[in-house]
Image (tube, rainbow, N blue to C red):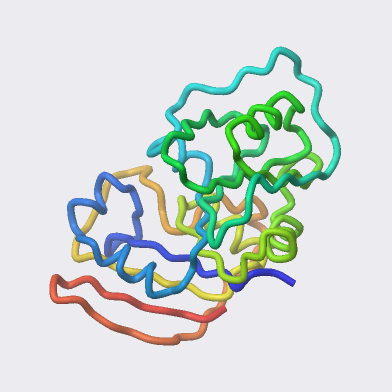
Amino acid sequence: MKPYIVCHMMQSVDGRIACDMVDKISGEEYYTALESLNCHSVIEGKYSYQLHTCGFDKFKPSGMKSINKEVFFKAEDSDGYEISVDNRGELLWDKTDNKKRLCILSEKVTEEYLDYLKEKGISYIVCGKEKINLKKAVTILYEIFDIKRLAVVGGGKINGAFLEAGLLDELSIMIAPGIDGRSGQPSLFDGIKDKENFIPQKIKFKSFSTFENGVVWIKYEL
């Protein structure tokens, strides 16, 4: 079993998702739409958290020995979590915001970092030898943390990882009336490693709506 997983993103007409650009061409429609999806838990990639929440300084353990086993820790029950994906355990957290946070990590994480999360009152899931096993992680989210609906909200690499793993049930894509055009900017889905064998994912149209400022909201089923 796993949660029903929706990828919810705002992009420019040319498919770019850089926040500094998107903020200039859209309003609050993204958050209004996200609330209507009834996903009380959201998951973001490491870079998104570095950019908006944690900063780019890294946790530095005194030793480098990995935990090398699958474990999880629930700091407290919650109706929803803000979930991060951090393979080796490097994000630094300020828990004065009182948000219910949950970190997903691989078995490369150190015991020292897990102790750090416990001290901060942050829940965690450790699964996957060299990299995070997303399929196992979402099963644990469902069975242990009682997460029935989950929104994947970027960036492009975490979106791509969920797509590549076949875990997405729905796409909720908002297109803002603007063009980025800059080289090298993040796209809606990115980072898929198996370029030769990956087959483009066919999707099924679900619904379409517009906002007064020109934002278009399209939903697809996978």
Q: Nearer the viewer, residue 30 or 155?
A: 30
- Which residue is pictured at 66% across the width and 34% down the height? 118
Residue 209 vs residue 199, the one in the foreground:
209
Q: What residue is shown at x 77% (from left), y 47% (from top)?
A: 127
Residue ranking furthest to the front: 76
Q: Is residue 117 left or right of residue 81?
A: right
Count of labels shown? 0
Query: Is residue 65 placed above or below 144 in the rendered structure?
Result: above
Q: In which quarter of the image is the N terminus?
A: bottom right
Residue in the foreground of this view, choosing between 23 and 117: 117
Residue at the image position 38 percent from the left and 86 percent from the top:
207
Q: In which quarter of the image is the C terminus?
A: bottom right
For this orientation, the residue located farthest to the right is 69
Q: Is residue 1 left or right of residue 34?
A: right
Q: In this view, does 113 lie to the left or right of 54?
A: right
Q: In this view, does 143 lie above or below 216?
A: above
Q: Residue at x 66, y 58 (%)?
A: 196
